[in-house]
Image (tube, helix red, strand yellow):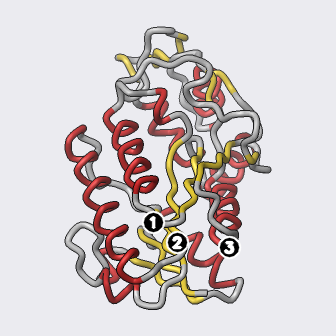
Amino acid sequence: MKIVVIGGTGLIGSKLVNNLRERGHDVLAAAPSTGINSITREGLAAAMDGTDVVVDVANAPSWEDQAVLDFFETSSRNLLAAEAAAGVRHHVALSIVGSERLPDSGYFRAKVAQENLIKASGIPYTILRATQFFEFVDGIVQSFAVGEEFRVSPALIQPVASDDVVAALANVVLAAPVNGTVEVAGPEAIPLDELARRFLRVTQNNRKVEPDVNARYFGAALDDQSLTAGKNARLGAIRFEDWLARSTTQTGR
């Protein structure tokens, strides 16, 4: 099977490319650095030739509201048009759990726009929505910094290891299109302020964490359903503490 992974050199894409190649598939890691650009369309038609499945795990270079919307809409339109012309049989996209529940965030609005383009394209598709990756917890915590402390929402979050996301993606890629959405999440839902404390404790950061129900997550107000998956979600096997212990050991913290 020929598979093109858009964003194939990034965190998720590079792991997915390796996973699928190990299973014996012909996998093309598509990115501007490899001569394939979904914004300018450079190399796109040639990449689609003979392709069975396209997996879109690309991310926007800027998260400014208009820039991120323009990226996902332009990239998706170009991809879907090239796929239709080449007869691609399955479009797989990685999105985010709860995107439609956080309309105050420009990034989440852009992901919903991307999903709507996929659904309207007529190409068989599967959208895999994931919760926030463990690898992003540091940035999430830092976004709540106020002076010398962190004022963090106590709403639940259900983060997941990128390796578990890749495993779920690989299974989706090799299955038939569902023409719908599936979810993957971590094994544990944790109050976000508690997650921050666990992360800071292990990384030896003594700054105080204060729960604040009004604290915003990248511009969006949260409740316990905002960042948690539904009851039918696929759950990853890797716990946050285990991932964090391994990661801090590897980085020598």
Distance of mark 1 from mark 3, alpha carbons? 20 Å
| Residue occupying the point 47% across, 66% down | 123
Image x and y of residue 89, in percent: 53, 76
Distance of mark 3 from mark 2, alpha carbons? 17 Å
Q: Residues within 10 Å of mark 3 (few under 14, many from 20)?
A: some
Disc 1 secondary structure class: loop
Extreme-right residue of the structure: 237
| Residue occupying the point 45% across, 62% down | 122
Disc 2 secondary structure class: helix
**Residue designated by label 1:** 10
Image height check: is 180 above or below 19? above
Tags 2 and 1 in contact by the CB under 8 Å rule? yes
Q: Residues within 10 Å of mark 1 (few under 14, many from 20)?
A: some
- Counting every numbered tag in the picture gives 3
Say what amino acid the circle numbered 1 marks. Answer: Gly
Nearer-N-terminus badge (1/3): 1
Disc 3 secondary structure class: loop
Image height check: is 247 above or below 224? below
**Residue designated by label 3:** 174
Tags 1 and 3 in contact by the CB under 8 Å rule? no
Q: Residue 14 — which label?
A: 2
| Residue occupying the point 49% across, 73% down | 54
Q: Which marked residue is nearer to the observer: mark 1 or mark 3?
A: 3
**For this view, does 230 lie left or right of residue 77?**
right
